Image: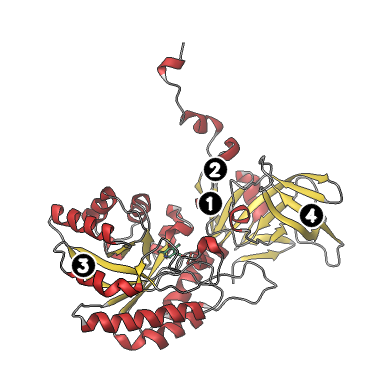
Amino acid sequence: MDHFLYNNGELHAEDVPLSAIAAEVGTPFYCYSTATLERHFRLFDEALAGMEHLVCYAMKAASNLAVLKVLADLGAGMDVVSGGEYARAKAAGVPGNKIVFSGVGKTRDEMRMALTGGIRQFNVESEPEMERLNAVALELGVKAPITIRVNPDVDAKTHAKIATGKSENKFGIPIAKARAVYAHAASLKGLEIVGIDVHIGSQLTELEPFRLAYEKVKELTLLLRDDGHEIRRLDLGGGLGIPYERSNTAPPLPTDYGAMVREVLGDLGCEIEIEPGRLIAGNAGVLVSDVVYVKQGEGRQFLILDAAMNDLIRPAMYDAYHDIVPVVEPAAGAEPEVYDIVGPVCESGDTFAKGRSMTAMREGDLVAFRSAGAYGAVMASEYNSRPLIPEVLVKGDQFAVIRARPSLEDMLSRDSIPAWLQR
Ligand SMILES: *Cc1c(COP(=O)(O)O)cnc(C)c1O
């Protein structure tokens, strides 16, 4: 459920008409709903009620400081994958003891930054990383709290580019090697083992792959405890999917997910961490764009928007589906037209949808891409020298620009011409 609904014939973000934001900030722009972000965080928090737990938002999904602050104010932890994300989490007021650090390529600088600034745990993904983290911790005279990310070799049944839990993926250590790796970790004086980590992929639409992975984690917990390790925390990753296509059967809800977690892992006495990203931010954001032209092609019509693949890359990168709806509510019974919906970038991949049926659109009409809050703005680039588009946050009847659109001068000022080219 989200808070982007038609009201008085116009699509609103909570109580604000999207057209009012467009008039003030121009198009295209991303717009987030505070109420939806809060609702989704609470759904996870409540789904794990009764078990000691922390919901660590996977901030790579949408990492604007204002979005992070909304969640931090509710008590969210953060899952970060870079020093930049760590800095954002701290800047949004998240204490170090609520930040977990994931990612396969943590550098010495990132390790130092987290060890000095405070960290709940590192989710270690390889033996070389373990050795390096041990060395950095010893240099600083501290112990680094760790889990080891295990790769359970489970098929997440999602798009290949976002599946992470099969043995061919680069993530984690093979679960079959886990006992040996934990034994080695226990011998390193700069590390403190606190638990186990697993994350099998993103946009999962069934519970079964999670269950398979978590059953393997349970088995491993018991083995590692037998080996004398203190396994007190299980980080179960993120990955629960969202309904992009409203006609499809909806993925399981956080409540169903929470019940399954309790059933599989509830009797281990472990603190549970989860790292949802997409489910918190995805349906909490829309991308609003303007129709630049309606172009008649050979046997097809193109709706050419002012948003492009550089603003929202998911359709080009993952063949992702987004609902694209007119901001002015279509009249009941209006004859639909069929469009290929594209951006202005010079690539055929700059196609958001093919053969999409929607109410007749004209130049200057606004459209909204639903479910664009996660992996939207964060994956944007300035390809074709298109400045990054602004982000707006709505709360009730208020809205604020939370990242301004850079001017062309701002964009150009980041380049410099070396002296030898200047004359
Ligand atoms: C991307 C990622 C997540 C979040 O995945 P979602 O599908 O957005 O919930 C969680 N944990 C790790 C380690 C990730 O890489």
Q: Are marks 2 and 1 in contact (CB under 8 Å)?
A: yes
At label 1, which amino acid type do we have?
Ala
Label 3 CA crowd tier, 10 Å (few <14, some 14–19, many 20+)? many
Q: Are marks 4 and 2 in contact (CB under 8 Å)?
A: no
Q: Secondary structure at mark 1?
A: helix
The kind of residue tagged 3 is: Ala
Of residues 264 and 217, the one drawn nearer to the viewer in this rendering: 217
Q: Which mark is residue 388?
A: 2
Sequence-first disc among 3 and 4 = 3
Q: Nearer the viewer, residue 71 or 133?
A: 133
CA gap, disc 1 to disc 4? Answer: 25 Å
In the rendered structure, find residue 331 and report the number of the disc placed on it.
Answer: none
Judge the density around disc 1: few (<14), some (14-19), many (≥20) Cα neighbours within 10 Å.
Answer: many
Residue at mark 3: 185
- Sequence-earlier tag: 2 or 1: 1
Q: Label 4: which residue? A: 339
Rounded to the nearest angstrom, the CA distance separating label 2 from label 1 is 8 Å
Question: Between tags 1 and 4, which lies in front?
Answer: 4
Q: Earlier in the sequence, mark 3 or mark 2?
A: 3
Task: Point out residue 137 in the picture as x, y percentages from the top left corner.
Answer: 18, 57
- Residue 306 lies, in percent from the top left, at 68, 44
